Amino acid sequence: MNPESISHILPRILPQVEKPSRYTGGELNQSIKDWDSTPVRIALLFPDIYDIGMSNLGLAVLYEIINARPEALAERVYLPWTDMETVMMREGIPLYSLESRRPVADFDLVGITLPYESLYTNALHALHLAGIPLRAAERGEQHPLVIAGGHGAFNPEPMAKFFDAFAVGEGEELILDLIEIVRQRKHSGESRLATMHRIADVWGMYVPALYRPEYHTDGTIARVAPTPESGDGNQGARTPIVKRIVPRLPPPPVRPVVPYIETVHNRYAIEIMRGCTRGCRFCQAGHVTRPIRERPVEEIVSSIDRALSNTGYEEVALLSLSSSDYSRITELVRALGVKFGGSQLRISLPSLRIETVSVDLVEALRSSRGGNFTLAPEAATDSMRAILNKPIAAQQLIETVREIYSRKWTTVKLYFMIGHPRETEADVRAIAELARAVLAEGRRSLGRRAEVHAGVSTLIPKAHTPFQWMAMDSRERILAKQDLLRREMRGPGLKLDLTPPDVSLLEAELARGDRRLGDVIERAWQAGARFDAWSDRFQPGAWHAAFEETKIDPAFYTARERSADEIFPWDHINVGVRKDYLRREYEASLEGRTRGDCREECFGCGILTTFRELRDALPEEAQFCPTIRPG
Amino acid sequence: MNRYKYRILFSKTEAMRFTGHLDLFRAWERLLRRAQVPLAYSTGFHPHPKIQIGAALPLGVKGDNELVDIETAEECGADALAHQIADSVPPGLSDIRVIALAADSPGLEKLVVAGDYSAEPLDGAWPTDFPQKIELLLAGTTLPRERRGKTYDLRPRILSLALDGNQLRMRLRLEPDATGRPDEVLAALGMESLPVLVRRERLVLRESEGKMIGSDELG
């Protein structure tokens, strides 16, 4: 099919589907470049529906960077919802891009983001709907290069069979290298294999076909090593793969596509800071996005100003892993108040530390009354928070909550996890007690209008974190803890939201898996698993059957406490944080020892040594990591 | 606080054809914010911009001479306002014209009584027995239909219905408790599975002393 025939059919079929605007494109600020005169054509694919994918900041960043290049174009692709998929199948319409309605298979490169594991089957489904062979090994010269990025790339092995390459780390500069390789390839007509070798030479790129995992008899990894023929001459491909970073944050997008229909986050989002210095031990993002880099206040304010005049958005979100740690946060909030006060702009500042000054910050940005205030204590006892390295004194939490309710926020949302190391029944019970104590504070200020919503998820020991050695709670243990919470958290004003154990366990299996898991993912997809992130679509049965048919035991990936020297499926991916540092952190955790903010003292995580040359080349005010003073 | 009212005429075209009523409201709000129009906001905990859209256009229907009323906190002037927003109009909206209103003039919900629609098959022509079907429909005094599980009588909501070449022209009532939908009329004529392009050409407004005026004749 060509764009003309797709455009001809669409008005005839769109009246039959729900939310047809998902499939039309044509929004404000979309970029349509001339196909024939632009040599490098990239499809940016989010493997879920438009409503979800349009809010992804990573793809919006790449979209603007690629389309600013004269030799390249980027168009957006999302999965159709099931009703549209049925109609597309009936009409023979392949997965197509929104801008020019080109079949995805016509692009030179298809970039698929994998920000979380429950999108893995959707990624396969997208390839299937695009008519591209699922397995990288089955693709020929005529097929696009299929490349994954996003946090899923930090353990690429479960999806390794399906991607020609993974972009590990930050994409702003890496994408320019890929554009150049594709441009040269089209000019020279070199083979796919030759291109893959050149991609493997790009900093941050991992080409899984050039590496082979070897296993011990007990199923653990012996090594993931380059194949003999993977490099030039006698040398194999590079190992390890060091993640890509940008030494300082490039300017943010200021002309994002504005959706016409409602999407999950329908607002202008700007990253104020990347990386985190806190070292919460469960947090993958806090470890894989190091080092810390801040965007200057002036650039944030002027970018928002430009973006608002390009979009008309009535809401802005200031994104980072820990807003309170942005060193000029008070100055930023003041500057935003001066610039945008009185313009009916809503500004959200998520991820604040639990302290009363956070309430002041949010209050200063507030444009309406009532509503929610979200806090993430993660655990309910001081001892558990020491294990997580997220120390917050119980008293401080209560004072913060008192301040929130007294300023007329009616609902406090609390995020917790269960399944921490050394967690006892008393620690779980403490979640309910804390929620009730918070509600009591609310009642004092607001009476019966006060509410507490507690979201309790299950800890998933993620790759590249100090908890990567630990065993995850079993299904039975999770269920027992959840039952306890349900019993303890009844009554008016209290709402409890629990993540179903099957959801958490699948996420853990996929996050911690090795290359053998590819067969399981493909079997599950064949059995109908997709939209696993949608609670009404998730099919645990399809996954159980897939594990059984492939004779792979899911508990192998989640239930074992791993030995100190076990080689992990992701060990050949170097995020800059050393494994021995993570191990020291794990041991400190089990002893209940905390570590401070690494802006004040360097704990030797490895980032500084990995990226020292980049750091030293920056002007002093832009240098990440503290200068280490001797002694 | 002073308030200034403006009535804006516009067309809703291809790129926004499949967006709903709330989406259109949001598109107008963002258009006016991009153009830095000094919108007036409601007071209260959750201030809303004073924007009122004439009558909801069904999904997939294009519209000409559609109406939106806005209130501003400063006097803008109709021509100046039209000029100010011209560069901020997104794909899917066009043909913007602005009329200044008296501050106490009644809202669109009190004025709009009907809409004039035209429908044309996307491919080819209507079936040959179509004129007879129309005649039969018009001859009836009632036309029971079911929508969202409720039975209602469509017939009194059809003010006129006639074939003009390949265009089916209909005037349908657009009152809060009695809205005639063009897709319902087409379904009643047995055309529910025929791909059709529907356009609302104008809104019909109540003028003084029972007179009616088309939105295309405003200003």
Image (spheres, rainbow, N blue to C red):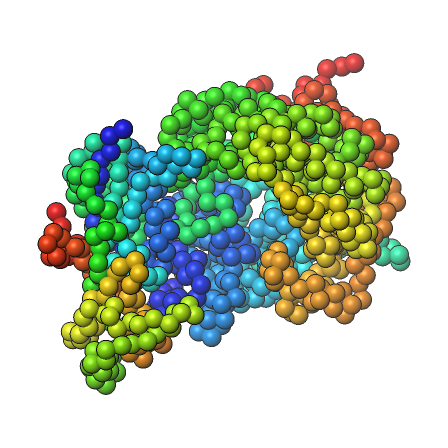
Compared to residue A575, the image places residue B20 above or below, namely below
Pick out the residue farthest to the front. A447
Which of the two residues, A147 or A343, is positioned nearer the viewer here? A343
In which quadrant is the N terminus of chain A drawn?
A: bottom left
Quarter of the figure that contains the C terminus of chain A: top right
Q: Quadrant of residue A353?
A: top right
**Whether residue B85 is situated above or below residue B110 in the rendered picture:** above
Instruction: From this view, report whether residue B181 is shown above or below residue A563.
Output: below
Residue at 59% in and 66% down = A133
Residue B80 found in image quarter? top left
Residue A408 shows in the view: yes
Q: Position of residue A431 (x, y in %)?
A: 74, 39
Residue A495 left/right relative to A66? right
Label tally: 0
Residue A214: % across, % down: 81, 55
| Vertical position of residue A344 compared to residue A79: above or below | above
Asked if residue A203 can be seen in this view, the reply is no
Q: Which residue is at the front of the view, B173 or A275?
A: B173
Q: Residue at x 21, y 49 (%)?
A: B9
Q: Is residue A377 rendered to the left or right of residue B24? A: right
The residue at 42%/43% (across/down) is A256
Q: Quadrant of residue B138?
A: bottom left
Q: Position of residue A560 (x, y in %)?
A: 85, 50
Q: Residue at x 54, y 25 (%)?
A: A361
- Residue toward you, A74 or A531: A531
Q: Position of residue A516 (x, y in %)?
A: 75, 60
